[in-house]
Image (cartoon, grey):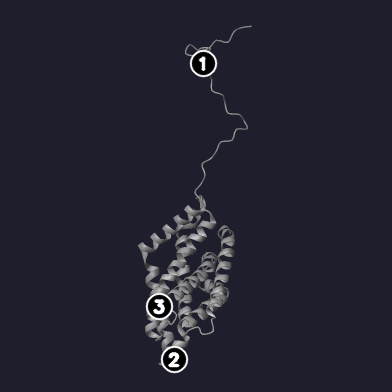
């Protein structure tokens, strides 16, 4: 039987590396975590807002104009203006949020940016949470800017301080932003998106808006019966429900 000849540069003592077996599994590098992806989405949206500022200017002007029109409609009765200040404040913020939320998803639909995000390893949960957090911060900042105007135009003084009012405004902004981000993703795919978004959003946020209006009214006029805690608890409950449900549904929305 002829012997197998080795090449000149290979001796019999040369060690030949073993080939990987068929069952050997190669470990793949782990992708970015949900927290890192969420932080990237937040950073991207904040950078877009800082460079453009178109949404800031238009929304702020619309909110101020809405508050002034409401005050003109009620007339010069200072007692009545102070009584309805909380409701008009949240109504102006809700109407302004439609413009803000619609613009936040429009920048994703332009030039198929949302399709590009789908090709990247970005979780729908991270995409929704990131955009909803940015919308919440934007509405909260808008509410804080409108607060001195409400005090001046409607002649109100916050008897319980600004701290509980800031908490109510943050919870109310979060309650509007979560379903608003979800419905904006639905409406942006339709032709009549400017009409569809308020039709979907307004009926859903009515319970949370009621809690925000009642809490704001108690902070302005005083809370002798101790009702503020119950209304804030109701607002927190609806806010948590909105965020959980919308986070679970957002993946189906953008896939469709």
Tell me where residue 237 appears, x and y as whole percent: 57, 70
Secondary structure under tag 3 reads helix
Q: Which residue is mark 1?
A: 14
Tag on residue 147?
3
Q: Residue at x 54, y 81 (%)?
A: 227
Q: Residue at x 39, y 82 (%)?
A: 151
> Which quadrant is the C terminus positioned in?
bottom right
The residues tagged by marks 3 and 1 sit, at their Cα atoms, a distance apart of 81 Å
In the image, residue 30 sits, relative to residue 196, either above or below, namely above
Residue 236 shows up from this direction? yes
Q: Nearer the viewer, mark 1 or mark 2?
A: 2
The residues tagged by marks 1 and 2 sit, at their Cα atoms, a distance apart of 98 Å
Q: Residue furthest top?
A: 1
Tell me where residue 58 appears, x and y as whole percent: 39, 73
Tell me where residue 186 appears, x and y as whole percent: 55, 65
Q: Which residue is mark 2?
A: 79
In the image, residue 212 sits, relative to residue 248, either above or below, namely below
Disc 2 packing (10 Å; few <14; some 14–19; many ≥20): few
Q: Is residue 64 left or right of residue 183?
A: left
Q: Earlier in the sequence, mark 3 or mark 1?
A: 1
């Amino acid at each position: 039987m002829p012997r197998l000849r080795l090449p000149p540069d290979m001796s019999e003592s040369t060690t030949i590396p073993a080939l990987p077996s068929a069952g050997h599994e190669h470990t793949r590098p782990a992708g970015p975590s949900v927290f890192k992806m969420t932080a990237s989405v937040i950073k991207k949206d904040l950078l877009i807002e800082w460079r453009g500022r178109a949404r800031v200017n238009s929304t702020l002007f619309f909110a101020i104009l809405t508050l002034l029109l409401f005050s003109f409609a009620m007339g010069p009765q200072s007692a009545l203006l102070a009584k309805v200040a909380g409701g008009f404040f949240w109504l102006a913020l809700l109407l302004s949020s439609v413009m803000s939320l619609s613009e936040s998803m429009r920048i994703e639909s332009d030039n198929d940016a949302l399709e590009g995000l789908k090709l990247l390893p970005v979780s729908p949960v991270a995409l929704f949470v990131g955009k909803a957090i940015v919308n919440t911060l934007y509405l909260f900042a808008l509410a804080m800017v409108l607060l001195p105007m409400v005090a001046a135009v409607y002649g109100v003084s916050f008897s319980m301080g600004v701290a509980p009012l800031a908490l109510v405004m943050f919870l109310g902004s979060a309650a509007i932003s979560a379903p608003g981000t979800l419905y904006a993703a639905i409406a942006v795919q339709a032709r009549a998106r400017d009409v569809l978004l308020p039709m979907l959003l307004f009926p859903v946020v009515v319970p949370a808006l009621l809690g925000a209006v009642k809490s704001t009214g108690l902070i302005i006029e005083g809370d002798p019966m101790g009702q503020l805690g119950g209304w804030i608890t109701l607002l927190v409950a609806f806010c948590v429900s909105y965020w959980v449900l919308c986070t679970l549904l957002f993946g189906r929305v953008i896939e469709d």
